[in-house]
Image: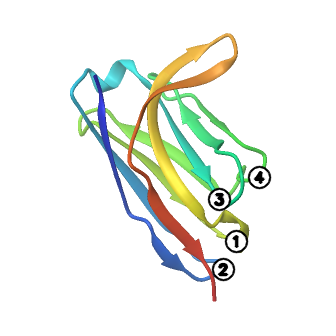
Amino acid sequence: QVQLVESGGGLVQPGGSLRLSCAASGSRFSIHAMGWYRQAPGKQRELVAAITSDGSTNYADSVQGRFAVSRDNGKNTVYLQMNTLKPEDTAVYYCSAGIISSRGYVAGYWGQGTQVTVSS
């Protein structure tokens, strides 16, 4: 079992930055791949970024070059640095712990989500 708690969401103006954090507990954090998803109103949940246990990363095209995922295994924490934010980035952001399969990242555990609103 893995428990995940996100923090760092909020209201930011277009062009601004936010950093989300996700603290993990309950299992060996370092063995898990981690992912950040988001879900906007009326839309499906989408994978935004993923990071493997050894630090390899992957991003959705919509955030490539603007978002950066990282992890600190000593602190059992994964981060999502979001720069040059756009109104279309507005969503609830979810942290997840999972595995890398032949289909790519697959989430197994979820946090409760944190709201990110990009608006002037």
**Residue ID for mark 4:** 62
**CA neighbours of label 2 inside 10 A, class few (<14), some (14 to 19), many (20+):** some
For the residues marked 3 and 2, what is the alpha-carbon distance in whole angstroms? 16 Å
From the top left corner, tell me how far across and down residue 43 is, in percent: 72, 53
Instruction: Answer with mark 4 or mark 1, whichever residue precedes in sequence.
Output: 4
From the top left corner, tell me how far across and down residue 83 is, in percent: 60, 65
**Residue ID for mark 2:** 14
Q: Nearer the viewer, mark 3 or mark 2?
A: 3
Quarter-wise, where is residue 90 in the image? bottom right
In the rendered image, the residue lying farthest to the left is 26
In the rendered image, the residue lying farthest to the top is 102
- The three-letter amino acid code for the residue at tag 3 is Ala
**Residue ID for mark 1:** 86
**Viewer-closest of 90 and 82:** 90
For the residues marked 4 and 1, what is the alpha-carbon distance in whole angstroms? 10 Å
**CA neighbours of label 3 inside 10 A, class few (<14), some (14 to 19), many (20+):** some
Asked which secondary structure carries label 4, the reply is loop
For the residues marked 3 and 4, what is the alpha-carbon distance in whole angstroms? 14 Å
Q: Nearer the viewer, mark 1 or mark 3?
A: 3
Residue at (33, 23) in percent of width and height: 30
**Residue ID for mark 3:** 40
Residue at (52, 67) in percent of width and height: 116
**Viewer-closest of 65 and 6:** 6
Instruction: Answer with mark 3 or mark 2, whichever residue precedes in sequence.
Output: 2
